[in-house]
Image: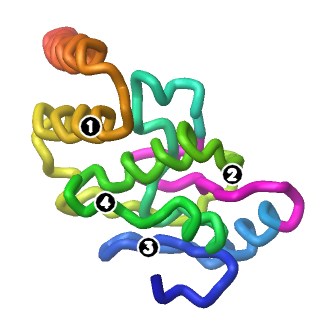
């Protein structure tokens, strides 16, 4: 709400921004007609893909929220702010509204254009998967997805989690 610049950048406690990050972001906003940018980010490996076509069944379709997300101020004001009722998933709600409802135009940087480093020891990295999925379903319900589909999706995610656990 207090931002005075043309572009807003999110950096949470513990996350790091690299020296060339702002220059990389500036080049994208100057060259392309975009409303937002997801930058590549280092976690346990480099995350860089932005896959909006998967939003109906996955909300983690972007490299990271903190440490690599940029949005034009006027678009942030049009979109609104974070719904803090979602605790750990307020970013999911914001991005679902941004992509599905508002149809804002965005992209991500290339794999070698790393913006920063995400703190893997933060509180969001310690949420149990079932709680994480529950919050995700609340976000989806708030944004108009069908309750029957959500129950099916939740069960599918739980089954897939256990399948992956037993396969590894």
Q: In the image, is 75 to the left or to the right of 14?
A: right
Q: CA distance from mark 4 to mark 1?
A: 13 Å
Q: Which residue is mark 2?
A: 109
Q: CA distance from mark 2 to mark 4?
A: 27 Å
Seen at 42% across and 66% down, the residue is 81
Q: Residue 92, image x and y in percent?
A: 38, 47
Q: Which residue is mark 1?
A: 136
Q: CA distance from mark 4 to mark 3?
A: 18 Å
Within 10 Å of disc 2 (Cα), the crowding (few <14, some 14-19, many 20+) is many
Find residue 11 and name its label.
3
| Residue span colored magenta | 30-49
153 above or below 87? above
Upstream in the sequence, badge 1 or badge 2?
A: 2
Within 10 Å of disc 4 (Cα), the crowding (few <14, some 14-19, many 20+) is some
Q: Secondary structure at mark 4?
A: loop
Q: How is the image coloured?
A: rainbow
Camera-side mark, 4 or 1 = 4
Within 10 Å of disc 1 (Cα), the crowding (few <14, some 14-19, many 20+) is many
Upstream in the sequence, badge 4 or badge 1?
A: 4
Camera-side mark, 2 or 4 = 4
20 above or below 150? below
Q: Marks 1 and 2: CB-CB under 8 Å?
A: no
Upstream in the sequence, badge 2 or badge 4?
A: 4
Q: Residue 160, image x and y in percent?
A: 24, 13
Within 10 Å of disc 3 (Cα), the crowding (few <14, some 14-19, many 20+) is some
Upstream in the sequence, badge 4 or badge 3?
A: 3
């Amino acid at each position: 709400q207090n931002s005075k610049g043309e572009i807003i950048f999110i950096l949470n406690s513990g996350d790091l921004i690299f020296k060339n990050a702002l220059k990389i972001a500036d080049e994208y906003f100057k060259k392309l007609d975009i409303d937002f940018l997801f930058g590549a980010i280092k976690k346990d490996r480099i995350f860089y893909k932005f896959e909006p076509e998967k939003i109906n069944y996955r909300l983690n379709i972007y490299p990271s929220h903190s440490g690599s997300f940029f949005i034009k101020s006027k678009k942030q004001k049009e979109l609104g702010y974070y719904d803090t009722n979602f605790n750990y998933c307020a970013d999911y709600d914001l991005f679902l509204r941004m992509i599905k409802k508002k149809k804002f135009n965005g992209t991500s940087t290339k794999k070698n254009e790393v913006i920063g480093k995400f703190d893997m020891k933060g509180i969001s990295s310690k949420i149990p998967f079932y709680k994480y999925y529950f919050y995700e379903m609340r976000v989806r319900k708030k944004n108009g997805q069908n309750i029957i589909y959500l129950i099916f999706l939740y069960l599918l995610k739980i089954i897939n989690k256990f399948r992956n656990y037993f396969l590894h």
